[in-house]
Amino acid sequence: MKIQVQKAKAEAFRTEALLLYHFKGEKALLDKTETMDRATHGLIREVIESGDFKGDLYQTSLIYTHGSGPAKRILLVGLGNRREYRFHFHLRVSGLAEYVSPKSL
């Protein structure tokens, strides 16, 4: 697997997989997650509203976009409760990508 970190607008960056985040229990999406939700015609919000993804700390959901956005897949990762969030959670959460991404990446 080749992991590359770049600063770019998520909706303009073609990639095999994109890592996005969501806090538990929040209806509002984080800015970049909201942008990608619009780009994929609501796929992210659909997974959250269905109850399949709650945003628990380290919870993951791999979403296949089927060409509806610039990323082939979105790895949605839970950050837990916002008031309990600590920066080191973010470091661990980002490291989950290697373990849950398909081997083909």
Image (cartoon, rainbow, N blue to C red):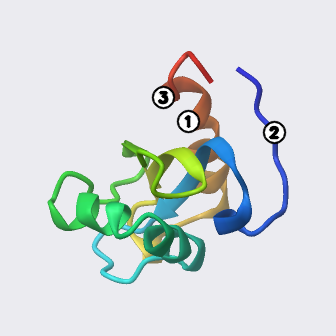
User: Which one is earlier in the sequence, the residue at label 3 or at label 2?
Assistant: 2
Which of pointers 3 and 1 indicates the residue nearer the eye? Answer: 3
Amino acid type for the residue under numbered disc 1? Leu
In the rendering, at what x and y percent does residue 10 appear? 67, 64
Picture quadrant of residue 8: bottom right
Q: Is mark 1 on a helix, strand or loop?
A: helix
Picture quadrant of residue 55: bottom left
Mark pair 1, 2: CA separation: 15 Å
Q: Quadrant of the C terminus?
A: top right
Amino acid type for the residue under numbered disc 2? Gln
Within 10 angstroms of label 2, few (less than 14), some, or many (20 or more) residues? few
> In the current view of this chain or complex, which residue is farthest to the top?
103
The residue where tag 2 is placed is 4
Kindly indicate whether the residue at mark 1 contacts the one at mark 3 (C-beta within 8 angstroms).
Answer: yes
Q: Is residue 22 left or right of residue 53?
A: right
Q: In which quarter of the image is the N terminus?
A: top right
Q: Is residue 99 left or right of residue 38?
A: right
The residue where tag 1 is placed is 96
Mark pair 3, 2: CA separation: 16 Å
Q: Please tell me which residue lies in front, 95 or 11.
A: 11
Kindly indicate whether the residue at mark 2 contacts the one at mark 1 (C-beta within 8 angstroms).
Answer: no
Q: Which residue is drawn at 41% across and 68% down?
A: 23
Q: Residue at x 26, y 54 (%)?
A: 53
Within 10 angstroms of label 3, few (less than 14), some, or many (20 or more) residues? few
Q: In this view, does 34 lie above or below 46?
A: below
Amino acid type for the residue under numbered disc 3? Val
Which of pointers 3 and 2 indicates the residue nearer the eye? Answer: 2
